[in-house]
Image (tube, coloured by chain):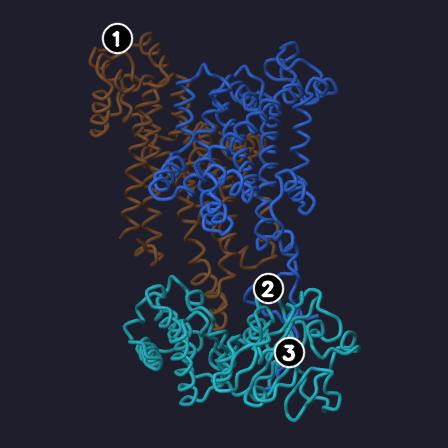
Amino acid sequence: MGLDVRLVAEQPAIATEAARPERGALHIVAGAMRSNRKALVGGVILAAFVVIAVIPGLLAPYDPHAQIFEQTLGPSREHLLGTTGNGQDIFSQLIWGTRESLAIAVVAGLMATVLALLVGVSAAYLGGLSDHLLSLLTDVFLVIPTLPLMIVVAAYARSGGLAVLIAVIVITGWSYGARQLRSQALSLRNRDFLDAARMRGERTVYVIAFEILPTMTSLIVANFLGAALYAVLAAAGLQFIGLGNPSDMSWGTMLFWAQNNGALNAGSPLWAVVPGLCIAMLGAAFALLNYAFDEITNPALRPKPRRAIEPSSRSSKFAT
Amino acid sequence: MGESGCGKSTLLYAIAQLLNPPAWIAEGTVRFRGQDMVALGDEELRHWRWRECSVVMQSAMNALNPVLTVGAQLRDALQAHESLTSQKIQERSAEVMRLVGIDAVHLRSFPHQLSGGMRQRAMIAMALLFTPELVIMDEPTSALDVVAQRSLMLQIKDLQRRLGFAVLFVTHDMSLVSHFSDRLAVMYAGQVMELGLTRKVFDAPRHPYTVGLMQSFPSIAGERQELTGIPGSPPDLLKPPAGCRFHPRCPHVMTHCRTEEPAVVDVEGDLVRCHLYPDGQQSTVPLLSSVRPR
Amino acid sequence: MGYLVRRLEFFLVTLWAALTLNFILPRLLPGGPEVALRTRFHGRVSPGTIKSLEVALGIHTQQGQLQQYLEYLGNLLHGDLGVSLGFYPERVTQVIMVALPWTLGLVGMATVIAFVLGTLIGIFGAWRRGGLLDSVLPPVFVVISAFPYFWVGLICILLFSITLGWFPQAFGSSSEVTSELSLPYVLDVLWHSILPAFTIVLTSIGGWILTMRNNMITTLAEDYIRMARAKGLSPTRIMFQYAARNAILPNLVGFAMSLGFVISGALLVEIVFNYPGLGTFLLQAVNNEDFSLMQGLFLLITVAVLLAVVAADFLTAWLDPRTRERA
């Protein structure tokens, strides 16, 4: 049997990237945006919303609350997106609403991530009964349907406004991340560098804060993105049914008023469409960044060129 | 034979036409009974598989489907190539299991219920379902302890004698090679450096890399000698050294080794890829190489 | 065996946690229902009814907390969720029974369809890496999954019922069709369910596609897939018996685990479509400050999700011989 085979292995594109030690969170995001188009799109949308949230006064032509215009006007030069059924300028509401919607996403996302880290990493690091109980707690919160729970909590604490809204989102939104962080921390637990730290006699808090957490930066960032996405959607849902404070200016409350005024049938569909679109875009920004992250940390998931290699098909078809 | 990462398994799977993307066969041929397997279409190849060439993998734990019983996986293979009654399937399955010394009740077991040695044997049983011409084995014993390793290899050897199939196997274990192989190919950095009869290569290694390998393990019977090993480490295959791939670690390196890729020459029936043998006959058999960077 | 015992523990703990949460919340955040109860019911209902409501809502009682807790659990054991404040004098259970079939039909069916369809698309997408399903759908659905469910519902109404007039924009059936079980009625109900069901499927399917695709990609790199190819099995057999069969295992548990989230979104879709299911009643409960109905709905939905989790566990154990024995 004579053999003459010459093979070509494609170079794994960012193998060296992945092998490099973990860097700071901002570097990771910046690196992701450079190498991945989905991350770039998500990053640009997010940046645009941040700018709008910082300087709404410069962008919005009118006071968003003032009911001083003719009702349900269509789009025009004076009112880019028309007016609401109450005679407010929709575009101005949209601009001013960005701040609260974005703030909820970031604050609730951060808090949920911190809570997830605390529970997930301590469960993995402590092990034994503590792990069992913390994991059980995580699973319980994961399974309990969030909306009805959020509604019950928010209804009872109606007067609390924004703080209650954020608290409810954090309480119902941390568990998914905790599960993921626990399993990664678990896989780190028996690595040599942790043994070394323990041998040196470092305290548990030190080991967790300075040895475990830095190696998990990517997953923590990814988790924040997921939690922020959840916060965007959850806040929108709660505000849409009138929980939270309906007189606050945010995209969710705009939808609440639009729905209550029957905006779709009353000739001002933009009133309902546009704030939802903004929520969708903010959510999509977080989701795209998150997805791009998955692709970067797991090279196998990266998109294949449309050259189509099916697993069953023969490699020889692509001989050069 | 070769050290980790030299491309042995890649070459083996290329021969079996089982490379996973993104790897593919860029050029070359695999001749099996005069036919070029690389040129075959998917369907023709599917008929060739298992009837004529079966595969045994390194770890049966990973190579057996965890959610199907051993029996179901044997049946799968049989049904893919022949339409048999379930009684015939049962008979043949029990027969091959007996061949490797496993009771037929284990056809009803799931892979995780068997011991490591039994799993490996079950995989060999599966490979013998059609008594193929060629059985390709990727480090078939490396997941086992030394005792189990030896008994499994002896069994393979015995089955081979009785059933008459050829075995192409890959390993980095020199003692396995010296005890169980007839012909030997030594690989380095994606290329076959030397190919010849095992006894001849062991007695008189020609390529400096082979010589280095022989000096890195002790011989039980031979005289005492110092284990020198090979200084340096294998090259980055994305950027292999120019000229001879072994030149940075070669004790006999010459100027043109750094620039010219050596041709494969025939030195007394032993194929060698080295500049040390300028008088050797140009080989008529092109020698294998597994990894070439883009 | 150990597996099922552990899952049983999980089921019981979650059930207990939900019941207890339901008991504690009103007591942690007092004030809400008390006002509603005073203004709406004082002097109009029997003292006994008031008392059971007070126990359920945790207000103004002379009993010790523990005794209240036991009484609360006892009431639940008898399936007694108290009286609805908004639909007085109907009991919460009666109100729920009216809404439940609608939600089971719409949300249940849509969720199952989304899961099955999404899983299939994920399988085929991963199988043909770089094909149309693989390169176009994932990014599209990443974006769509980030849309608020109810907003997608609004857009669907705007597009398909207000603009195009293809489908009705609200309610579970037309008022002119009687609610007897007749063919026109069934067709009418189906007719009304298409748009909300489409909304739920569209927004939730992306998650299933992506997780199944990613699991498949991981599974396809396994040795046993290469082995199956070496055996010369037919591609369909490899795809389903070897790859998908293994790849779906983590997804089943994932399905159960994220069901709570999906149902939450689906309830909001019901609200948008004025569908006579649990979601719409939940909104009415919020608007009427009907705390007993709210809490009853919370418990019911939690139990429903838990039952789905148990079902998924049994299915996993059935499909995966390893879980059956793992201690």
Question: Badge 3: how crowded within 10 Å, few (<14), some, or many (20+)?
Answer: many
**Cα gap from disc 3 to disc 1, whole angstroms:** 100 Å
**Cα gap from disc 1 to disc 2, whole angstroms:** 76 Å
Q: Are marks 1 and 2 in contact (CB under 8 Å)?
A: no
Total tally of numbered discs in the picture: 3
Q: Residue at x 52, y 61 (%)?
A: C221
Query: Residue at the top extreme?
Result: C43
The amino acid type of the residue labelled 3 equals Tyr
Q: Earlier in the sequence, mark 3 or mark 2?
A: 2
**Residue C161 visible in the displayed image:** no
Q: Is label 3 or label 2 in front?
A: 3
Question: Depth check: B235 or A158 in front?
Answer: B235
Q: Colour of chain B?
A: cyan
Q: Label 3, on which residue? A: B209
| Location of residue B260 by image quarter | bottom right
Question: Badge 2: how crowded within 10 Å, few (<14), some, or many (20+)?
Answer: some
**B53 with respect to C44 (left or right):** right
Disc marking residue B21: 2
Q: Are marks 1 and 2 on the same chain?
A: no
Identify the secondary structure beneath mark 3: helix
**C166 with respect to B96 (left or right):** right
Q: Residue at x 56, y 75 (%)?
A: B12
Q: Label 1, on which residue? A: C44
Question: Which of the chains bears the disc numbered 3?
Answer: B
For the colour brown, the matching chain is: C
For the colour blue, the matching chain is: A
The amino acid type of the residue labelled 2 equals Pro
Question: Which of the chains bears the disc numbered 1?
Answer: C
**Cα gap from disc 3 to disc 2, whole angstroms:** 31 Å
**Residue B177 visible in the displayed image:** yes
Query: Residue at the bottom extreme?
Result: B268
